[in-house]
Image: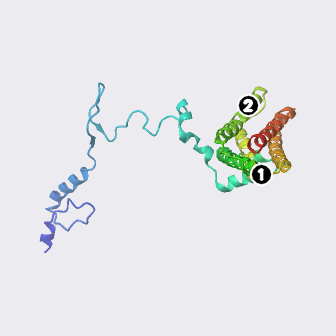
Amino acid sequence: MDESFANLQTSHLLGSVPAVISDDQKSSTDVHISTANDGPSASMQNFPPNQGKNARNYQTLETPTEGPGPEQQPSNTWKGFFNVYSYTQYFDVDTDVVLNRLMSSLYPTSADFFNKIDANPDMYGLVWICTTLVFVLASLGNCATYLVKKRTDANAPWVFDVNYINLAASVIYGYAIIVPLVFYFSLRYMGSKADLLRFWCLWGYSLFIFVPTSLPLLIPVEFLRWVIILLAGGASSCFVALNLRSYLEAASNDVTVVVAVAFGLQMILSLFIKVWFFP
């Protein structure tokens, strides 16, 4: 029985327990085992060979490839500005963080907004708030004109004005992008510290107060509409002015003019919303 088991070939069973063999058969068996163990260490080759004028012979697995791979392109080139993935870091915020910043924008006397966004200023609030405000102004503005016209003359014809969407998108997006950009270059020219991303975040969240206040502007009472828009515009203007002042007062001796201009532009926007969308 022992001799029959010893004659079994075990060289192809890698990792198995070898059978008990005699001394005169050990040498022949070792030859087979060493041959099996030497197999994986052989140099493997990639087929087909390289093509081209300066092509080499077959490349082995140990030969490193030349040049960066498709996922190792340099990110510091000008092409990164046209890559969507380079802007994902500015939209990486949680819902709780966004809600906290939205609630902060509703308090006009709060001047610690830059401290809250210092670790992670985002562009999500700017895009989401501006888009929401555009659709709110376009839809509720048409509803407001409908209620006013039906109140004066119930038989008067009314047509939905699609141009409200184009006007709202041009004004809201243009204001939220261009105004912080102008403040950034102006402050940089005057030698003050300025951060464009933080400015976009501040002005973007400052427009949130016009979203909920657009609903009571549907009330067809002109005096009440003016009171609502002045309160909303004053709160938004104070929010921008106070936070901008707290951000710049450490680097500038006199920021009164800058703060006054920021306050005035925010009030002009609120008056524009009232005159054009809720006449």
Q: Identify whether 213 is placed above or below 75.
A: below
Query: What type is the residue that disc 2 sits on?
Result: Val
Q: Which residue is mark 2?
A: 182
Residue 102, x across and y down, in percent: 73, 51
Asked if residue 26 is positioned above or below residue 62 in the image, the reply reads below
Give the position of the N terminus as an image quadrant.
bottom left
Q: Name the spot of residue 114 as percent of width and height, x first.
A: 76, 44
Whether residue 104 can be seen here? no
Could you tell whether 225 is left or right of 46 in the image? right
User: Is 152 or 241 nearer to us in this picture?
Assistant: 152
Q: Taking 80 as reference, is 142 left or right?
A: right
Q: Quadrant of the C terminus?
A: top right
| x then y, percent, for residue 136 | 68, 48
Tell me which residue sits at (24%, 50%) in the image: 39
229 or 44: nearer the eye? 229
Residue lying at 79% horizontally and 27% vertically, measured from the top left: 190
Q: Which residue is mark 1?
A: 151
Q: CA distance from mark 2 to mark 1?
A: 43 Å
Q: Which is more N-terminal, label 1 or label 2?
A: 1
